[in-house]
């Protein structure tokens, strides 16, 4: 079940788990810059196989650069 739109103001647990998997940290203020459609995409996009992890990482990196002008912060894996 996907979070309701109002629930996407904060980073949902499912997205935090995926971000941990891809080794990227994003701040709530950066998350809130993403459009609602982009947030939903990150909730719904699969991130299990090696290929899916790479695609997810690329999407997150693109979004962070688009809205902040900088590379996303890497997390310790």
Image (cartoon, grey):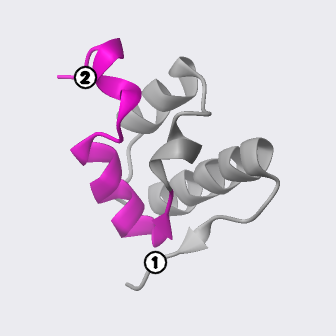
Q: Residue furthest bottom?
A: 76
Which residue matches tag 2?
3
Instruction: Locate residue 65, reporting x and y percent.
Output: 76, 52
CA distance separating discs 1 and 2: 25 Å
Identify the residue shown where x is 32% and y is 15%.
6
Tell me: 62 left or right of 19: right
Mark closer to the chain start, 1 or 2 = 2
The relative height of residue 39 versus residue 12 in the rendered view (above or below) is above
Q: Is residue 42 magenta?
A: no
Which residue matches tag 1?
75
Quadrant of image for the N terminus: top left
**Which element type, helix, strand or loop, lies under badge 2?**
loop
The relative height of residue 50 versus residue 77 in the rendered view (above or below) is above
Foreground residue among 44 and 61: 61
Tell me which segment is drawn in magenta: 1-26
Instruction: Locate residue 24, reporting x and y percent.
Output: 50, 67
């Amino acid at each position: 079940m996907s979070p309701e739109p109002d629930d996407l103001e904060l980073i949902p647990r499912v997205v935090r788990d995926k971000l941990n998997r891809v080794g990227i940290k994003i701040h709530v203020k950066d998350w809130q810059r993403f459009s609602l459609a982009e947030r939903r995409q990150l909730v719904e996009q699969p991130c299990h196989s090696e290929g899916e992890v790479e695609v997810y990482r690329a999407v997150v990196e693109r979004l962070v650069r688009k809205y902040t002008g900088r590379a996303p912060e890497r997390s310790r894996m």
